[in-house]
Image (tube, rainbow, N blue to C red):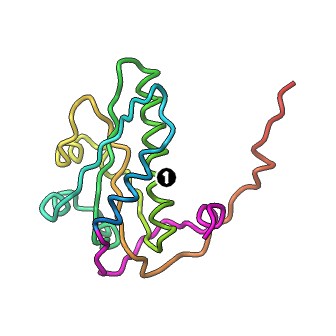
Amino acid sequence: MDILDVIKSRRTIKKFKSDAVNLDLIYSWLEAAKMAPNHRMTEPWEVYFIGPDTRAKLKHKSDFGNAPVLIAVVSKQGASAVEKQENSLATACFVQNFNLAAWSEGVGTFWSSIGITAKNKEILEVPENYDLVGVLGIGYPEIIPDPKPRTSIMNKIKNLP
């Protein structure tokens, strides 16, 4: 599948098969994800693999669609408000790279913001100087939803003089 097909066909998966995902594949997608643009090469992201005890404490309403693998992605805040924003944006690019790499090999993801509450940040042991960008459920899709309608990009373009 070429990159445009991967981008256009990727979906948020909310129901996963119980089939295990090879850990070496996940590591390879994380290696690819680290090529995300990041200002001043701060590489602000860190990845936490979430075990069953921690997962249970999160009490997600759908248990992340029963995804067999769960990770949290955090971003170092930085020394200034500008650096914090740059780092968060870079880490979001890291997550998207990961999602696309996984999708290209038939593995889906569910990107949840459940960890942004103080309680869940504590459960996930997120250090004070880090932000939680998301918790990702990872697995083989049981159901691939149809795409939701999107606004034409032509309605989102502004030409400046």
Residue 81 in percent (x, y) is at: 42, 20
Residue under the point 22% across and 61% down: 59
Residue under the point 41% across and 57% down: 111
Please state which of residues 95 and 39 is positioned toward the viewer in this rendering.
39
Majority secondary structure of magenta residues:
loop
Q: Residue furthest left?
A: 53
Q: Please rate how many residues cluster around mark 1, counting C-alpha atoms within 10 Å: few if below 14, some from 14 to 19, many from 20.
A: some
Q: In which quarter of the image is the N terminus?
A: bottom right
Q: In which quarter of the image is the C terminus?
A: top right
Q: In this view, does 79 lie above or below 7?
A: above
Q: What residue type is labelled 1?
A: Gln
Is 108 on the left-hand or right-hand side of 67?
right
Residue 80 in percent (x, y) is at: 39, 18
Please state which of residues 146 and 95 is positioned toward the viewer in this rendering.
95
Let me know if residue 98 is in the magenta part. Answer: no
Let me know if residue 11 is in the magenta part. Answer: yes
Q: Residue furthest top?
A: 80
Is 73 on the left-hand or right-hand side of 52?
right
Read off the residue under disc 1.
Answer: 96
Please state which of residues 94 and 130 is positioned toward the viewer in this rendering.
94
Q: Start and end of the magenta stretch? A: 1-22
Q: In this view, does 37 lie above or below 106?
A: above
What secondary structure is found at the residue carrying circle 1?
helix
